[in-house]
Image: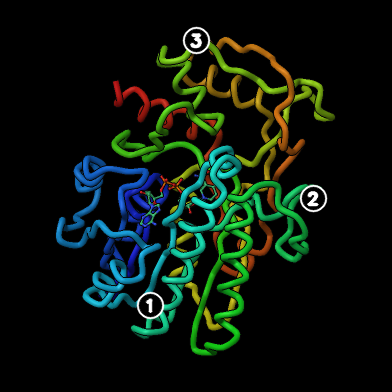
Amino acid sequence: MKTVLLTGGLGYIGSHIAVCLQQSWRVVIVDNLANSSLEQLDRLQQLCPIAKADVFVADCADLTAFEAVYASIRPDAVIHLAGHKAVGESVEKPLMYYHNNLNATMNVLTLCARYATRTLIFSSSATVYGPQVSPMREDMALLETLNPYAETKAMSERMIRDFVKTHPDFQSTVLRYFNPVGAHPSGLIGERPNGIPNNLLPYIQQVASGKRPHLNVFGNDYPTPDGTPIRDYIHVMDLAQAHVAALNGATLGHHVYNVGTGKGTSVLELVTAFETATKIRIPVVVTARRAGDLVESTADVSKIEKELGWKATRSLETICLDAWKFESSQR
Ligand SMILES: NC(=O)c1ccc[n+]([C@@H]2O[C@H](COP(=O)([O-])OP(=O)(O)OC[C@H]3O[C@@H](n4cnc5c(N)ncnc54)[C@H](O)[C@@H]3O)[C@@H](O)[C@H]2O)c1
């Protein structure tokens, strides 16, 4: 069985990928626990037979520390998820984001070259498109990003693209995630934000569980049918399965794909979907617009459907029910 290394594999998305890959790949994880804990490993082990010895606590942004474990793993493929991901925090601490996210990507490429790893899947983000008109297409030029987090993703993508130009035996796939939400249907793993959630559904989950009194909706005067911004929410299990498709369908060269559903959902539509699915009312308070929020961000998903044969299948109702099951298990 071939070995795949998941950097940042104890986090929200990586743990779901580990579950989906376990039948066809040996999964090894490197994570520095910056936004995860070994308690997550206990829950993950209830879903997939990953050995404790295959989980290494190390910092991918530190080449010496990372190489010490990489040399013992010598993976056939890497799924590079490790990175900081909070947009607001990146505006306040840009150097922390540039240091962590860019060094981690550079080190992954350095070690791929040094240890003959020939396949890389990179976790990018729809934020690389900046303020362009949806649906976003992979062939749109990346002109301007709105924050340092997005910039680290755009720069990492370019680093990988340039690396591939000089390594013709390499296969890299960049996956631009839209809005990953939901949880594994068991309720054992899901998104656990530290402090105030940055993302909408985790916030709604916390209002539903009584941790927060209401949901702030930042502006209801956008040019959309109900006045609130529109996003493309994708179930984390669908997203995880896109990685399986990317890994099994990897081909030589550099490839970029959007990973979303292609469907837009407004803030208020998501609130209603959650209320309908769970029968829990979510009090809403409309406040002023938030700087930097796009009116709409949705994916054109025709390329990944055509080339990798992958398509999201889970509904908004499933997203809400699975997210709520996970949240309920946290109390
Ligand atoms: N969740 C989203 O909404 C979203 C959207 C688009 C892209 N992404 C990207 O997907 C990836 C995974 O996101 P997630 O939601 O699972 O985040 P997460 O924070 O839950 O997981 C990231 C993991 O990486 C680890 N990590 C961070 N820096 C590290 C380093 N230098 N060395 C080793 N481990 C490190 C953290 O401890 C954490 O376990 C990230 O790169 C993120 O930017 C996420």
Q: Amino acid at mark 2?
A: Gln
Q: Amino acid at mark 1?
A: Leu
Query: Which of these two is toward me, 331 or 234?
Result: 331
Q: Tag on residue 127?
A: none
Within 10 Å of disc 1 (Cα), the crowding (few <14, some 14-19, many 20+) is: some
Of marks 1 and 2, which one's residue comes earlier in the chain? 1
Q: Residue at x 38, y 34 (%)?
A: 192
The residue carrying mark 3 is 213
Locate residue 143, reporting x and y percent.
Answer: 77, 59
Q: Amino acid at mark 3?
A: Pro
- Cα separation, mark 2 vs mark 3, equals 34 Å
Locate residue 31, reporting x and y percent.
Answer: 31, 55
Q: Is mark 3 within 8 Å of ligand 1?
A: no
Locate residue 227, reporting x and y percent.
Answer: 78, 23
The reply to whether residue 234 is in sight is no
The residue carrying mark 2 is 132
Query: Looking at the rendering, which quadrant does residue 81 occupy?
Result: bottom left
Within 10 Å of disc 2 (Cα), the crowding (few <14, some 14-19, many 20+) is: some
Count of labels shown?
3
* Callout 3: SS: loop
Q: Residue at x 69, y 16 (%)?
A: 287
Q: Tag on residue 111?
A: 1
**Colouring mode (rainbow / by chain / secondary structure / one colour):** rainbow
Query: Which of these two is toward me, 311 or 268?
Result: 268
Q: Nearer the viewer, mark 3 or mark 1?
A: 1
The reply to whether residue 10 is in sight is yes
Q: Residue at x 25, y 56 (%)?
A: 57
Of marks 2 and 3, which one's residue comes earlier in the chain? 2
Query: Which of these two is toward me, 134 or 82?
Result: 82
